[in-house]
Image: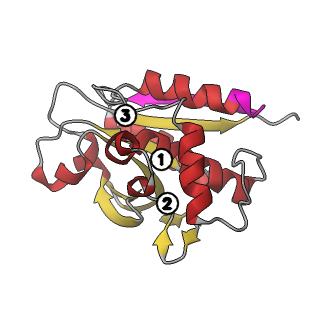
């Protein structure tokens, strides 16, 4: 079974990129804000929300950079980074509330069993919504580029017990083994965020 969500491009770039941000701290520590920006643009384009304050059908690098400035007060870089799901949920949740959005946020902590995380991730992708993911320290050098980093998951492919996920960051993507990603072997863990769109019916 395989499911990949549509994404968007800015020129040849697969989505946005935190390295575009004009603020130095946002370039080195704006990954949480960047994933929130990505979610907003995706939801506007494919779910009909009104979260991106520019034209979601004509996304430019200039507007994307400015959107980073808009998101910064909600998920601003800090010394320890946005290293807890609760910080992300509070900050992004406030942005969503300020936009009068009917979206709620929940989280699956990295201390939870991988089976619960898989079910949540698959359910969210199947409902057409990407998944913000936080990876903290990891014992496997394979994930060095993802350490202390927020990124987006916008697809999965399942082969029996193996779940591969499509990780999106820095204007690119690659497939990762979810069990290897989730089981970091470290005491301090990250986790994933679940977005739920509340319907009026």
Seen at 51% across and 36% down, the residue is: 72
Q: Which residue is mark 2?
A: 16
Query: Which of the 4 quarters of the picture holds residue 10?
Result: bottom right
Q: Are marks 3 and 1 in contact (CB under 8 Å)?
A: no
Q: Locate the C terminus and report the quarter of the image it occupies.
A: top right
Q: Are marks 2 and 1 in contact (CB under 8 Å)?
A: yes
Seen at 22% across and 26% down, the residue is: 188
Circle 3: element type: strand
As drawn, is 155 to the left or to the right of 127? left
Residue 54 locus on image (x, y percent): 72, 54
Few, some or many C-alpha atoms within 10 Å of disc 1 (few <14, some 14-19, many ≥20)?
many
Tell which of 121 and 73 is nearer to you.
73
Q: Is residue 86 inside the magenta stretch?
A: no
Q: Does residue 163 lie above or below 82 as drawn?
A: below
Per the model, the C-alpha gap separating discs 2 and 3 is: 22 Å
The tag on residue 191 is: 3
Q: Is residue 106 inside the magenta stretch?
A: yes
Circle 2: element type: loop
Residue 94 locus on image (x, y percent): 63, 25
What span is in magenta?
97-109
The tag on residue 172 is: none
């Amino acid at each position: 079974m395989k499911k990949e969500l549509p994404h968007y491009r800015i020129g040849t770039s697969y989505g946005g990129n935190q390295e575009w941000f004009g603020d130095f701290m946002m370039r080195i520590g704006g990954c949480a804000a960047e994933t929130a920006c990505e979610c907003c643009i995706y939801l506007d384009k494919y779910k009909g929300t009104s979260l991106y304050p520019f034209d979601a059908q004509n996304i430019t690098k200039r507007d994307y950079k400015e959107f980073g400035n808009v998101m910064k007060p909600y998920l601003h870089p800090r010394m320890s980074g946005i290293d807890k799901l609760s910080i992300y949920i509070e900050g992004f949740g406030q942005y969503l509330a300020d936009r009068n959005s009917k979206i709620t946020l929940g989280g699956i902590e990295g201390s939870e069993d991988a089976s619960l995380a898989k079910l949540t991730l698959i359910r969210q992708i199947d409902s057409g919504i990407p998944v913000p993911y936080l990876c903290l320290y990891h014992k496997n050098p394979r994930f060095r580029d993802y350490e202390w980093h927020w990124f987006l998951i916008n697809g999965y492919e399942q082969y029996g017990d193996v779940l591969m996920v499509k990780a999106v960051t820095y204007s690119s993507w690659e497939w990762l083994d979810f069990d290897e990603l989730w089981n970091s072997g470290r005491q301090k863990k990250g986790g994933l965020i679940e977005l739920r769109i509340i319907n009026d019916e």
